[in-house]
Amino acid sequence: MRGPSGYFLPTTYAGETVRAFVPNALPPNPPIIWDSSLQALSQKAMLAVGRLDGLTGQLPDVSQFLYTYIRKEALLSSQIEGTESSLSELLLFENAESPGVPTESVREVSNYVAAMEHGLRRLRDGFPLSLRLIREIHGKLLAKGRGSKKQPGEFRNSQNWIGGSRPGNASYVPPPQDLVLDSMGSLEKFLHADANNVPPLTKAALTHAQFESIHPFLDGNGRVGRLLVTFLLCHEGVLQQPLLYLSLYLKQHRKEYYELLQRVRTDGVWEEWLAFFFQGVAATADQAAGSSSRVLRLFQDNQRKISKLGGSAGSVTRVHELLKRNPMLSVNRAISLMEEAPTFATVSTAFSRLAELAIVEEKTGGQRNRVFAYKDYLDILNEGTEPI
């Protein structure tokens, strides 16, 4: 056995002495043992990611799929943290047509979307994956809602813990606050140290586990840690588009996930953690590729139905194009998104034609401010988003 991947530091909190864990700098020492089984899992994961990345080039407009897929990931990642919301509620919230939607929960998911999009935009603009960017992402994540008073965008200046009512009965106590910046600084060096020659998927796995051990923020650590995986793979050029998100896999294997993170700390089982991570990457990439293919077929099948409408096919096609990016859409919002400023009657009729073709369903039950759902598309995206 390798032994702990860090050291336990006695620290006092509210009069109690507890053992906080301080992780050693990466990469692991002694080095990871790459037996044939772990190498095979790593290769399988890389091949699955490669297939997914190649598939994105076949989508006629990958941004259409990304728009909603990112929202699914935001929902799943927030669910892991206990947020109760649905994809339909988030999309209704963004339509500003959301009576009865639990706004606080949906706002948290919406914050996650903003944090994700901000990070991806910064990386596309050439900004390095750095502590500054991590803090910016955190600031977006906690900009509004329940976490807005927990130092958004700043590393913590007090002790935190996981599980329990205090550090004394917690399941895990991260490093004391005065060691957070040093620990995160070491992680940043690992991210940019070419001399380590660590393959991108391995680097993502090690970085995620290390970030979770440091737990540098008062709130939102899990969500930022999961975002880091995708950001790192995009930054390293493994993914051209941010289509790989592990939250569904981690949600489905939550108990094993938390146990392995803890065993990495106490027993240094990096090989077991990497095996779990690679299996998750392969399963997630295959699932995303399958969803992408099904969505592409759905769009093509529905467009064939629309093309048979005759004279109204043009306006219906334009609304269908909007629904690919916004699968929950009101008539008014559709009009606002169109460049040529069509009449209300034209767009309303187009939605009615789509409903007659069973492509959309009217969800609000009203004559005014009607909202339509692209049902089959949402059904694909909703897979796995059921409450935990």
Image (cartoon, rainbow, N blue to C red):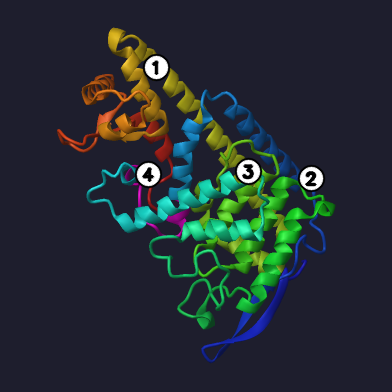
Q: Secondary structure at mark 4?
A: helix
Disc number for residue 303: 1
- Circle 3 packing at 10 Å, graded few (<14), some (14-19), many (20+), is few
Q: Nearer the viewer, residue 179 or 83?
A: 179
Taking the spot 17% from the left edge, 36% from the top edge, the residue there is 365
Q: Secondary structure at mark 3?
A: loop
Q: Nearer the viewer, mark 2 or mark 4?
A: 4
Q: Earlier in the sequence, mark 2 or mark 4?
A: 2
Q: Secondary structure at mark 1?
A: helix
Taking the spot 41% from the left edge, 17% from the top edge, the residue there is 301
Return the residue at label 3. 125
Return the residue at label 2. 36
Stretch of the chain drawn in magenta: 76-91
Q: CA distance from mark 1 to mark 4?
A: 24 Å
Q: Earlier in the sequence, mark 1 or mark 3?
A: 3
At label 4, the amino acid type is: Leu
Q: In the picture, residue 234 is in which quadrant?
A: top right
Q: Is residue 146 left or right of residue 333?
A: right
Q: Earlier in the sequence, mark 3 or mark 2?
A: 2
Return the residue at label 4. 87
Q: CA distance from mark 1 to mark 2?
A: 47 Å
At label 2, the amino acid type is: Ser
At label 3, the amino acid type is: Asp
**Disc 4 vs disc 3: Cβ atoms closer than 8 Å?**
no
Taking the spot 71% from the left edge, 62% from the top edge, the residue there is 187
